[in-house]
Amino acid sequence: MTVKEILAPIETEMKLFEVRFHESMKSKVPLLDKITHYIIRRKGKQMRPMFLFLTAKMLGEINEKTYQSASLVELLHTATLVHDDVVDDANERRGFFSVNALWKNKIAVLVGDYMLSRVLL
């Protein structure tokens, strides 16, 4: 089974998720917005939110809590990747420069911390 086939039953929900996830990343700090926009544009397959939406649909309905949960799990995952790249001193993530390669480790750690704080809020 391909990712496209897995996505088919929740394609509409994932498009709305994309919009809502981008909104959840916005801040009042221009540099932070620039970096989070860079991260979002280079997103992965978003399997965690897909599994969450598929499970919610299978067990009942997709509602506001589903969208919030999907955003939280994706934000937590993304924050750990940003921190992981710092720990590993990785210069690339998914074929593109990592956050720490472009903005250095201190900024990358703070961006990862910002994402984790958004999860907690």
Image (cartoon, rainbow, N blue to C red):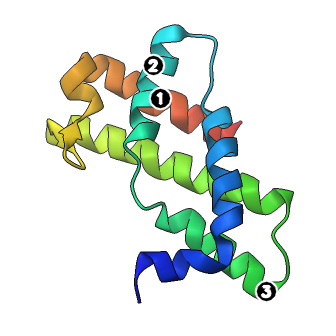
Q: What residue appears at the point 39 percent right and 55 percent down from the top-left corner?
A: 44
Above or below — where is 30 with respect to 101?
above
**Residue 26 coordinates in the image, percent (x, y):** 62, 25
Q: What residue appears at the point 47 percent right and 29 percent down from the top-left corner?
A: 37
Q: In which quarter of the image is residue 45?
A: bottom left
Left or right, 49 with respect to 111, comes to right
Position of the N terminus, as image quadrant, is bottom left
**Amino acid type at mark 3:** Leu
Residue denoted by label 3: 59
- Quick one: label 3, few (<14), some, or many (20+) residues within 10 Å? few
Q: Quadrant of residue 73?
A: bottom right
C-alpha span from label 3 to label 1: 33 Å
C-alpha span from label 1 to label 2: 5 Å
Position of the C terminus, as image quadrant, is top right
Residue denoted by label 2: 34
Left or right, 55 with respect to 38, comes to right
Above or below — where is 50 with respect to 20?
below
**Amino acid type at mark 1:** His
Residue denoted by label 1: 37
Closer to the chain start, of discs 3 and 1, is 1
Label 2 near label 1: C-beta < 8 Å?
yes
**Residue 118 coordinates in the image, percent (x, y):** 63, 34
Closer to the chain start, of discs 3 and 2, is 2
C-alpha span from label 3 to label 2: 38 Å
